[in-house]
Amino acid sequence: MGLSATPEREYDEAGNDFLQNEIGEIIFEFSLEDAIKKGILCEFNYIPLNYELTEAEKQKKKNIIAAFRAKKEKGEPYDEKDMYTQLALVNKTAISKIDKFEQLVSSRPELLQKCIIFVQTMEYGLKLQDVLIKYTDKYHTYYADDEKYNLVNFSEGKINCLLTCKKVSEGIDISSVTNIFLFASDRSRLVTTQRIGRALRLDKTNPGKVANVIDFVLEDAEENDHNADQERKEWLITLSETRRGEYEE
């Protein structure tokens, strides 16, 4: 039997449950929803942005599937999880997300204040910077090899926005963070929890703080996508409807 204080169950891109497999049945959980109800974390607004894959991206996913099927038919060794990981990478780096991002921040530039933007790769981050620079010059990247003083500058308000990736998602603990953009988020709820958690910290200087989580959801997801974006959307919508003071012992 396992005891878990982990906010949510953890799944990989193929939907495997790590806690169930590695630890055993959970006998106690204290979820993000519970933490918001008890006022340990702040409430948040959820803003889903629909995006589509280009024809080239769709073809890339077909090629990935075909390659794995060919290995299977030939009796060659293959790992289905690798296929799902590669398919998910196409979604995470979809180019149309950048246009959706610009449409939103052009009308709501305040979302780039006290903001962390999570992308999958540095290469994708470079493409996003071409848009980001149009709306703020007070941003900086924070990847694995960037100087940590950029994080200090962000915490002190000298930088409004950090463009980062999952390698540092567990290392950011600044209570003033208010806005999170999820250009990339794994099927695992644990990863999403870590990322949105950067904005759900209570802020003593802003007791009425309400965070914003901006997510990207694939339209017309195919069977091999396992509807991961839609599943995350439904979960975050429910979570965003949670209000303080609703906790029951």
Image (cartoon, rainbow, N blue to C red):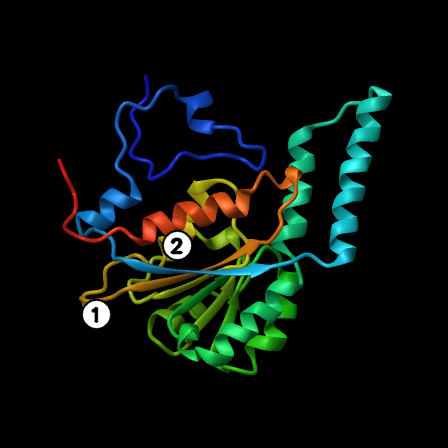
- Helix, strand or loop at label 2? It is helix
- Residue kind at label 2, given as amino acid type: Ile
Q: Mark 2 points at which residue?
A: 196
Compared across the picture, whether 222 is left or right of 230 comes to: right
- Helix, strand or loop at label 1? It is loop
Relative height, residue 33 to residue 140 (above, below): above
Residue at image x 19%, y 70%? 205
The image quarter containing residue 86 is top right
The single residue placed furthest to the front in the displayed view is: 220
Compared across the picture, whether 88 is left or right of 66 comes to: left
Q: Which of 206 and 73 is in front in this view?
A: 73
In the picture, the disc for residue 166 is: none
For the C terminus, give its image quadrant.
top left
Relative height, residue 91 to residue 142 (above, below): above
Upstream in sequence: badge 2 or badge 1: 2
Q: Which of 141 and 147 is in front in this view?
A: 141
Residue at image x 29%, y 34%? 5
Relative height, residue 175 to residue 184 (above, below): below
In the picture, the disc for residue 206 is: 1
Looking at the picture, how far across and down is residue 108, in whole percent? 43, 77
**Residue density around tag 1, few if under 14, some if 14–19, many if 20 or more, within 10 Å:** few
Q: Which of 219 and 136 is in front in this view?
A: 219
- Residue kind at label 1, given as amino acid type: Asn
Looking at the picture, how far across and down is residue 165, in whole percent? 53, 56
